[in-house]
Image (cartoon, helix red, strand yellow):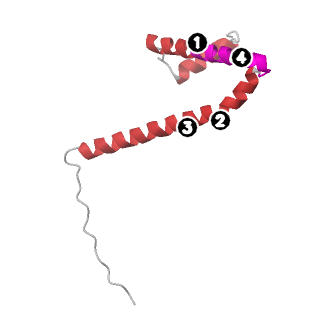
Amino acid sequence: MEPEKTPRERAEDLINLLVSDWRPSPRQVVWAIRIVLATAVVLGLLTLVGWPFGITLWDWLKLLVVPAALAIAGLLFTSSQQRAAQADAERRARPGRTRLPRPHRATPDRQ
């Protein structure tokens, strides 16, 4: 009988099952570090600015949630529109796939 696996081993098995060969590239690691450092600097500055006025970090976070959500939604919408436009342009550029529009058939009006 096998010894029971630790939670960490079970988590690693699940991750390997879901994404078998994924490892972050050095570029992804650098960007992750940049994002974490920038976030820490911004939160630290907000804390220092608000300290004399009795504004806590939690107050800043509550204040900035809505603008951050709107900014993220705008970025996602823009990227979605760009992907759709790119796919449309690629579809139109394919040779042999052009179709002329059908002529409109006039149907007699029934009275």
- Reading the image, the residue beneath label 3 is 73
Marks 4 and 3 sit apart, C-alpha to C-alpha, by: 26 Å
Please identify the quadrant where the C terminus is shown. bottom left
Mark closest to the chain's N terminus, 3 or 2: 2
| Location of mark 4 (residue) | 47
Is 48 magenta? The answer is: yes
Taking the view exactly as shown, the residue that stands out farthest to the front is 52
First to last magenta residue range: 37-55
Q: Which amino acid does label 3 sit on?
A: Ala
Instruction: Give whichever of discs 2 and 4 has the lower sequence position.
Output: 4
Q: Residue furthest bottom?
A: 111
Q: Position of residue 10 (x, y in %)?
A: 65, 16
Asked which secondary structure carries label 4, the reply is helix
What amino acid does circle 1 point to?
Leu
Residue at x 66% of width, y 30% of height: 64
Q: Gap between marks 4 and 1, in whole Å?
A: 15 Å
Residue at the image position 72 percent from the left and 30 percent from the top:
62
Q: Position of residue 27 (x, y in %)?
A: 44, 13
User: CA separation, marks 3 and 1?
Assistant: 23 Å
The answer to the question of whether label 3 and label 2 lie on touching residues, with beta carbons closer than 8 A, is: no
Q: Could you say which quadrant of the image residue 106 lies in?
A: bottom left
Give the residue pinned by disc 2.
66
**Which is more N-terminal, label 3 or label 4?**
4
In x, y percent, where is residue 81?
43, 42
Residue type at mark 2?
Val
Q: Is residue 18 magenta?
A: no
Q: Eyeballing the image, is 32 above or below 77?
A: above
Q: In this view, does 47 lie to the left or right of 21?
A: right
Q: Which of 19 and 31 is in front in this view?
A: 31
Q: Mark 1 points at which residue?
A: 37
